[in-house]
Amino acid sequence: MSANNFAAVGVFLVGAIAVSIIMMLMPKLLAPNKPHKEKLTTYECGNETIGRTWLGFKSNYFMYALVFTAFDVETVFLYPWALTFQKLGTFAFVEMFIFIVILLVGFWYAWKEGALEWM
């Protein structure tokens, strides 16, 4: 690699950092700073809250969403494989079999750890 390639990367890096700093400073400099009373209140379906506003809830909901997202993204890889299955041959079939086995092992582990329990 020549020095010109590194210079181009450096220019883009400095530009990206400068643009992000400018974007973070623009609202502070240009936006009006007049907080309205209504904007400082807690909003929950239009009703005033009764009792404590900040309530903790189980992290199982997040774990369920993370496991779903992981499996959903992984199954997206099955579609292009299925479209080109006949062209790819036996090697691709073995690789996809290993991929599906890894998915099933992950699913089994998530089930065993209780990440799929809703309540």
Image (cartoon, rainbow, N blue to C red):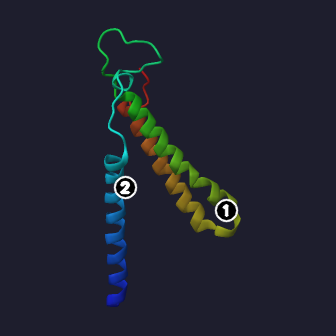
Q: Residue at the spot x=50%, y=56% of the render?
A: 98
Which element carries disc 1, helix, strand or loop? helix
- Residue 63's place in the image compared with 85, above or below, is above
Q: Which mark, by number, is residue 119?
A: none
Q: Residue at x 48, y 47 (%)?
A: 103
Query: Marks 2 and 1: which is nearer the front?
Result: 2
Q: Position of residue 80 (x, y in %)?
A: 63, 59
Kindly tell me whether residue 1 is visible in this rendering: no
Give the spatial CA distance, label 2 vs label 1. 46 Å
Mark 2, other Cα within 10 Å: few <14 / some 14–19 / many ≥20:
few
Which kind of residue does numbered mark 2 sit on?
Met
Disc 2 designates what residue?
23
Residue 49: x percent and y percent?
37, 12
At 44% across and 24% down in the image, what residue appears? Answer: 118
Q: Residue furthest top?
A: 50
Quarter that holds the N terminus: bottom left
Evaluate if marks 2 and 1 touch, with contact meaning CB atoms under 8 Å apart. Answer: no
**Left or right of 90 on screen, residue 25:** left
Residues 1 and 33: in front is: 33
Residue named by callout 1 = 85
Which quadrant of the structure image shows residue 61?
Answer: top left
Visible residue check, residue 72: yes
Sequence-earlier tag: 2 or 1: 2
Residue 41 place in picture, x, y as percent: 35, 21
**Residue 71 in picture, x, y percent from top left:** 50, 44
